[in-house]
Amino acid sequence: MKLKDLEYYILDEIAKKNFGNLSHHFFETSKTEFENSLDNLKKHGFIQGNIFDSNGSIKNQFKFFFLSEKAESLLSKNVF
């Protein structure tokens, strides 16, 4: 799978635990493009984590994201 630049930058911010930067405003992109990139990263196993509380409500999803080994390996091979 070929990642878009935005997806690499999202992974990098998660790796640095800069969860406050995970918004479409920070990346200066549309909300739809940002959400699609997150979905794509989850779908292909680059980020993992539970975004739901036990009662089914959404918690602050970004604080519960973590990189998979696949994503960590990808980031270690690329320099931004």
Image: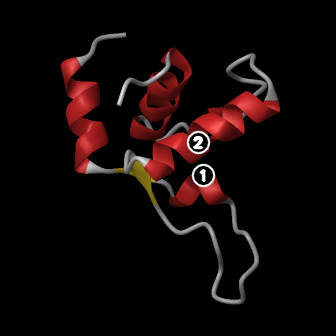
x and y, in percent, of residue 62 in the image: 60, 52
x and y, in percent, of residue 2 in the image: 38, 24
> Which residue is found at the position 56% from the left and 21% from the top?
6
x and y, in percent, of residue 48 in the image: 43, 57
CA gap, disc 2 and disc 1: 10 Å
* Quadrant (top left, top right, bottom left, bottom right) of the C terminus: top left
According to the picture, the residue beneath numbered tag 2 turns out to be 38
User: Can residue 22 be seen by looking at this rendering?
Assistant: no
Identity, as a three-letter code, of the amino acid under mark 1: Phe
> Which residue is found at the position 25% from the left and 43% from the top?
70
Circles 2, 1 touching at the beta carbon (< 8 Å): no
- Which residue extends farthest front? 1
* Quadrant (top left, top right, bottom left, bottom right) of the N terminus: top left
Q: For the residue labelled by badge 1, is the local secondary structure a helix, a strand or a loop?
A: helix
Q: Is residue 37 left or right of residue 44?
A: right
Q: Is residue 64 left or right of residue 33?
A: left
User: Can residue 41 be seen by looking at this rendering?
Assistant: yes
- Which residue extends farthest top? 80
The correct choice, above or below, for 79 with respect to 8 in the image is above
- Which residue extends farthest bottom? 55
Rendered image coloring scheme: secondary structure
The correct choice, above or below, for 66 with respect to 79 in the image is below
> Which residue is found at the position 71% from the left and 29% from the top?
33
Mark 1 Cα shell of 10 Å, populated few (<14), some (14-19), many (≥20): some
The correct choice, above or below, for 32 with respect to 56 in the image is above
The correct choice, above or below, for 4 with respect to 54 in the image is above
According to the picture, the residue beneath numbered tag 1 turns out to be 62
> Which residue is found at the position 73% from the left and 70% from the top?
58
x and y, in percent, of residue 34 in the image: 69, 32
Residue 74, image quadrant: top left
Identity, as a three-letter code, of the amino acid under mark 2: Leu
Q: Which mark is residue 70?
A: none
